[in-house]
Image (cartoon, coloured by chain):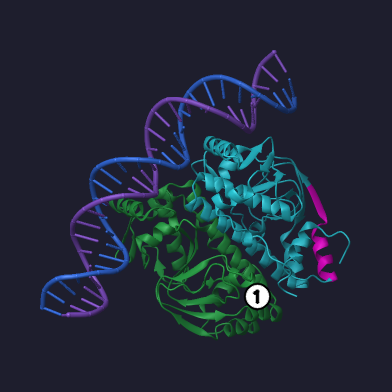
Chain colours: A cyan, B green, C purple, D blue
Amino acid sequence: MTALQSPFARKLGAFVALSATEITAIDKLHARKKQFPAGRDIVHQGQTNQSAYILASGWACSYKLLTGGTRQIVDFQIPGDFLGLRSVLFRTSDHNIEPVTQLEASEVLASDLLETFSNTPRLATAMLWAASRDEAMVVEHLVGIGRRDAKERTAHFLLELGARLKLVGLGTTSGYDCPLSQYLLADALGLSAVHVNRVLRELREEGLVTFQHGHVEIHDLDALVLLADFDKTYLDHDGPLLK
Amino acid sequence: MTALQSPFARKLGAFVALSATEITAIDKLHARKKQFPAGRDIVHQGQTNQSAYILASGWACSYKLLTGGTRQIVDFQIPGDFLGLRSVLFRTSDHNIEPVTQLEASEVLASDLLETFSNTPRLATAMLWAASRDEAMVVEHLVGIGRRDAKERTAHFLLELGARLKLVGLGTTSGYDCPLSQYLLADALGLSAVHVNRVLRELREEGLVTFQHGHVEIHDLDALVLLADFDKTYLDHDGPLLK
DNA sequence: CGGAACGTTGATGGACATCAAGGCTAGTGG
DNA sequence: CCACTAGCCTTGATGTCCATCAACGTTCCG
């Protein structure tokens, strides 16, 4: 157990109890640290031979563009998250990744990843776990867009984000900082920016949650959970599942 | 290369070139074959210590229930697909699985799976690949619900299903058999059954595709692909990615 | 100071849900 | 063999949630 583990190592460690060798292998993935400015995509839909990244600081989002010009944001990534796994596993990327803020991330080449899997195979299992958690989030997102109305959906989104940020120490039960614009929110929630604005106002006027000036303040957690039908079990679990 | 591989082995083999030992390990997962009647759930949301299954014949769907009583179908599974991976990796299941038709599937216990990963570690990597492909489908589904209108969405769904069935030899470019009711379609597409009916009629009247009596007949593939903005690269790729 | 990006609010319209009713088919029991 | 039921499909009428269009305010930064 090293003194200072990366958030990423901590995340994998939640699934598989890691040996010293395995932790070292993870650390090696952090060798090539890079900076990216906000707004310029770092992975493009259709591009081949992309790298993946481990996010150290800042926020990113992964999205898909449709021919109509609209886009759908699939997920936001926060520190400790892995970016662009699918772009590496498949030769060509099926989505874009855009930094929402300036960000710092370690580049992971396809060869790095496959080598790591072959040298420390339990890390492949750990990654499978982490990827499955990500999939669970996408699924929850899908359910929200398919069957929740705008208000429930927005509430659910804010709650999920809060829960995730709390897990990496970037938020509390009562609130968190959030650099997302209403336009980004709209593209994630499958709504128009105008409507997002109205919904946020309603939520604020009803005393449930305030999202203003880059900060989310949760006023009535219970009511919000009830409204959103939020169940956080898919995000959390206790202790490594594989010894 | 054995003479008769299971569809599941074939699928994993598409990602990782499999050795004889690895193929044997996969075959062992098929030991406990079971039958399930249509309509009765085989995995329940919230249940713990579930098994996973490899689907041999028949169709299933995985879905989530909301407190309002509505449901969202996340995906349909067809022969060769793995059911309930997340129910096994996490101790408690975050979704339900319902057989759409009568089906035949091999039960895979959590211990079977972890043992397989530890004995033949490259299979963990292969599963990661397969899970990522599934995630790509869910993502595409999310994009559809978020940003495509009912007609585009329905067209996209029918095309994706066709492409998947074709990969396992259950369909051609011109059509396939499909046991899904309009109610199931509605729950998958995030629409009402009534509206699904209207959309199907429009698609039929425009000479694009006919879905009647359990059969989908594609009349104008190009027009359909154009309408749905369908790009099948996320489903397909050529040759094993890991030698 | 001027412009860009974002937030806010009102007015209008459309896509889709909901309600309602009826038809078709297959299975069931008298 | 025919009533009866249960699913599923089909179509029309009405309503609503949210998109779209338009305009203006605010903040920030060059």
Q: Name which residue lies at 74% across and 40% down.
A: A37
Magenta region, main secondary structure: helix
Q: Identify whether B29 is placed above or below A72.
A: below
Q: Could one spot residue A190 in this view of the protein?
A: no
Residue pointed to by mark 1: B123
Q: Name which residue lies at 53% across and 62% down.
A: B235
Q: Secondary structure at mark 1?
A: helix
**What x and y, as percent, mark residue B122?**
68, 75
Magenta highlight on residue A32: yes
**What x and y, as percent, mark residue B208?**
33, 53
**What x and y, as percent, mark residue A52?**
71, 56
The reply, left or right, for residue B12 in relation to residue A37 is left
Asked whether A215 or A221 is in front, the reply is A221
Q: Could one spot residue A239 in this view of the protein?
A: yes
- Quarter holding the N terminus of chain A is bottom right
Asked whether B35 or A84 is in front, the reply is B35
Which amino acid type is shown beneath numbered disc 1? Leu
Label 1: chain letter? B
Tell me where the magenta segment starts and ends, as one range. Answer: A20-34
The reply, left or right, for residue A113 in relation to residue B169 is right
Q: Residue furthest right?
A: A3
Q: Name which residue lies at 54% across and 35% down.
A: A198
Q: Residues within 10 Å of mark 1 (few under 14, many from 20)?
A: many
Q: Name which residue lies at 75% across and 75% down.
A: A243
**Count of numbered circles in the view:** 1
**What x and y, as percent, mark residue A113?**
73, 64
Tell me the quarter of the picture where residue C8 sits.
Answer: top right
